[in-house]
């Protein structure tokens, strides 16, 4: 009975996410010119989009190395090649099967089923990995706030807040996940590389779209990282709609071109989707990744 109820709850959650994403997308299409966005994307420089794709792939390889740093403390001794295969399988599941067992859940299952790694440890490693990335994203947002063309009270005080996310993350590891505390510096540096490369991918897309006002790049990048946080909140289907809504509303407040802001969001999602496609190959015989 409990299993049936859990399945019903998951189905209801999936349907709710689909409706929320659909509702947000409907709202966005009612506020912007879809044809103009289509024209902006059609005019985009293909070569620069390919550069963005390459940079994004590099960021995901760095993210895989970050996760394996945590795996080795569990300890799980798998090669970097095997880890990257497992990571890409997770990317595919996260992006294309957001309503079922996500990529993180599947990695936990694989490690437990084939390598007998305790579920609690795997979950701890993956949570620390995700939290590390979120910490650096928040740090980047706090830095970019000083360059955003928008005034608000006590803006200068935010300089003092820049190190707070990293300090909070360190003490979280120390008190909640002490097994991974010694990896704090390494995974933080990996996260800087991951988010730095993704920021470069976003810049490449902005160039591809022909955004000539380089002074506005800080504003676009601020919305880019803010949308990453919004997309991570599990109320939409794989973040669909949440990213675009953030760009739409943020562009209005920051006096940016809304069509270009939404185009940046859509193209970055497309880049991430294309980069995740190789994970499809590993879904055929996933057990061979670890054994």
Image (tube, grey):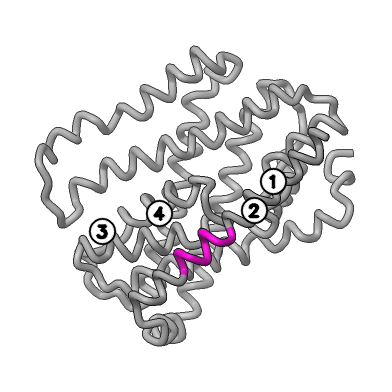
Which element type, helix, strand or loop, lies under badge 1? Answer: helix
The residue under the point 55% across, 66% down is 271
Which circle's residue, 2 or 3, is located before the other in the chain?
2
Which circle's residue, 4 or 2, is located before the other in the chain?
2
In the picture of the structure, the residue carrying the numbered disc 3 is 219
> Residue 34's spot in the image, x, y percent?
41, 82
Label 1 or label 3, whichever lies nearer to me, is: 1
Q: Which residues are magenta?
A: 18-25
Q: How far is mark 1 from mark 3, CA to CA?
A: 37 Å
Which element type, helix, strand or loop, lies under badge 3? Answer: helix
> Disc 4, disc 2: CB below 8 Å?
no
In the picture of the structure, the residue carrying the numbered disc 1 is 10
> Disc 2, disc 1: CB below 8 Å?
yes
Q: How far is mark 2 from mark 1, CA to CA?
A: 6 Å
Which element type, helix, strand or loop, lies under badge 4? Answer: helix
The residue under the point 82% across, 55% down is 283
Q: Is residue 218 left or right of residue 235?
A: left
Q: How far is mark 4 from mark 3, CA to CA?
A: 12 Å
In the picture of the structure, the residue carrying the numbered disc 2 is 14
Query: Mainly helix, strand or loop, the magenta region?
Result: helix
Which circle's residue, 1 or 3, is located before the other in the chain?
1
- Please tell me whether residue 138 belongs to the stretch shown in magenta: no
> Residue 9's spot in the image, x, y percent?
68, 44
Q: How far is mark 1 from mark 4, CA to CA?
A: 25 Å
């Amino acid at each position: 009975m409990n299993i049936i109820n859990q399945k019903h709850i998951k189905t209801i959650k999936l349907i709710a996410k689909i409706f929320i994403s659909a509702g947000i997308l409907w709202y966005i299409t009612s506020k912007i010119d879809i044809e103009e966005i289509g024209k902006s994307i059609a005019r985009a420089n293909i070569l620069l989009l390919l550069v963005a794709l390459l940079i994004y792939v590099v960021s995901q390889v760095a993210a895989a190395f970050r996760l394996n740093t945590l795996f080795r403390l569990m300890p799980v001794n798998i090669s970097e090649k095997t880890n990257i295969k497992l990571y890409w399988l997770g990317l595919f599941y996260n992006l294309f099967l957001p309503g079922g067992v996500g990529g993180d859940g599947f990695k936990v299952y694989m490690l437990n089923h084939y390598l007998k790694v305790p579920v609690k440890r795997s979950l701890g490693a993956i949570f620390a990995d995700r939290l590390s990335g979120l910490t650096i994203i928040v740090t980047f947002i706090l830095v970019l706030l000083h360059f955003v063309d928008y005034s608000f009270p006590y803006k200068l005080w935010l300089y003092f807040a820049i190190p707070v996310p990293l300090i909070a993350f360190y003490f979280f590891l120390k008190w909640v996940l002490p097994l991974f505390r010694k990896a704090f510096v390494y995974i933080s540096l990996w996260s800087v590389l991951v988010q730095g490369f993704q920021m470069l991918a976003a810049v490449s897309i902005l160039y591809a779209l022909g955004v000539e006002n380089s002074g506005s790049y800080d504003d676009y990048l601020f919305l880019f990282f803010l949308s990453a946080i919004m997309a991570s909140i599990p109320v939409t289907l794989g973040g669909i709609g949440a990213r675009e809504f953030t760009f739409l509303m943020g562009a209005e407040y920051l006096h940016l071109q809304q069509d270009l802001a939404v185009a940046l969001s859509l193209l970055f999602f497309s880049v991430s989707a294309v980069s995740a496609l190789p994970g499809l190959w590993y879904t055929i015989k996933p057990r061979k990744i670890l054994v």
